[in-house]
Amino acid sequence: MSGILTTWPRRLSTPVVLRLARVGSCGKLPAPGTWGSLAGLTYFNIFFAFSPSPVVWILNLLGSIVAVGICSEAEVRLGKSDPGEVVLDEFVAMPLCFLGWDRLPENWSVWLVCLAGFALFRLFDILKPFGISRLQRLPGGWGVVVDDVAAALLTCSVLHGAARLFPAT
């Protein structure tokens, strides 16, 4: 099963694989992970902000599986392990920062939740605390994507914890 999940992109052309892995041109910009995350935040706000959490979970699980395949193939085509220009992992993980979104903006303003989620995700993606760094050792695209998913879920937990501790008045 894992083979099918990671080998299907071999049939795609190199320009298509790299365009998807770089989320257009985000991966070619300075600080590509930040741009990929910003694109993911935009993606969340357009497609998921008003969706129930189960829909966000299901669609992002599917998106993460697709990202594993694309990121695996991008590593092969670029000849690098977890290249910085591959930002599809940040893009697909970002919406997971906001699971339970409907309970967050009731406590804080929408822009504050988005800003805090973005900043926390970037912090956790860079520092990789609580063993997240070990997830990068998974083979191929699994290591590229799963550490970002873990950083997003940690961000989500911190946002919900902060919303409970510091309710807006």
Image (tube, grey):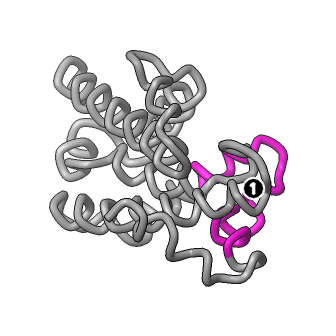
Is residue 89 shown above or below 62? Answer: above
* Residue 151 lies in quadrant: top left
The residue at the point 75 percent across, 56 percent down is 27
In the displayed structure, does residue 126 sit left or right of residue 101?
A: right
49 vs 8, nearest the viewer: 8
Tally of marks = 1
9 vs 32, nearest the viewer: 9
In the displayed structure, does residue 90 sit left or right of residue 1?
A: right
The verdict on residue 56 being magenta is no
Q: Which three-letter amino acid code belongs to the residue tagged 1?
A: Gly
* Residue 28 lies in quadrant: bottom right
The residue at the point 68 percent across, 54 percent down is 75
Work out which quarter of the rendered image holds the C terminus and state it.
top left
Magenta stretch bounds: 17-38
| Residue 24 locus on image (x, y percent) | 71, 70
The rendered magenta stretch, by its main secondary structure, is classed as helix
Q: Is residue 169 visible?
A: no
